[in-house]
Amino acid sequence: MRKKAPKGWVKISDFEELTGVSAKTVAAAIKRGYIPENFADVVGTSATSPYYLNPQQAAICWYKSLNAAHPAQRKVREALAGYIKTFDKTIVAPPPKEPDGAATKITYEDAQLQEKIAKARIADLELQEKEGSLVSREAVNDQLFAAGKELRDALLTIPDRITDIIMAEENRTIVYNTIYDAIAGELQKLADLQIGPIK
């Protein structure tokens, strides 16, 4: 929180006019960490104090954090690109081709930004897992393993249950049907198995 907005900083509503991105979307980007705290902050001491941001740096950071291939992010990215081109066309221009084997250079600020974005995404995944809309691979594997073990154990008990019946029969059709029915019955039990909620 700052008492006074730094020189050149603007309100979210002004940033909306510059970029065409809605104030609500801008506020959400600040809260999710797409725009770092050093480029966006509350100015004032009251509970309703507005957010101000460095328009150029905020636009650049946010633009770099968005995925051009993601349909939901493409529109915002394009709007930011249009604004960024008004002061620095090189940022949105296609990057020059690196020679094979050349190491990609990354600045300290870019590394910090990527770390914040990664943390925000991890927090989002953890929230989805707690709400039950996302299930861990480990939990799914545990239930599949339990179901597979149950089927294996059931199939291994079939010889003990039907050996005497088969030995007493001379009719091939009855022997075949006895074996088939025993196996089909265990498979049907697996098909009818109600898997409980994964925790």
Image: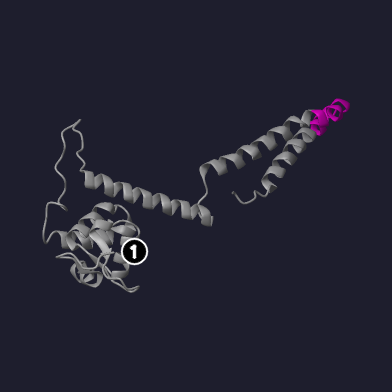
Residue 167 magenta-drawn? yes
Residue 74 magenta-drawn? no
**Residue 63 horizontal/vertical position (percent):** 24, 56
Residue at 19% from the left image edge and 59% from the top image edge? 81
**Residue 191 horizontal/vertical position (percent):** 67, 45
Question: Going by the image, does 69 lie left or right of 170?
Answer: left
Any part of residue 60 in sight:
yes
Residue at 56% from the left image edge and 43% from the top image edge? 139
For the magenta stretch, what is the residue range? 160-175
The residue pinned by badge 1 equals 28
Question: Going by the image, does 124 lie left or right of 107?
Answer: right
Residue at 34% from the left image edge and 64% from the top image edge? 28
Disc 1 residue type (three-letter): Ala
Quarter occupied by residue 79: bottom left
Query: On screen, 87 above or below 107?
Result: below
Q: Residue furthest top?
A: 167
Residue at 68% from the left image edge and 43% from the top image edge? 190
| Colour scheme in use | one colour
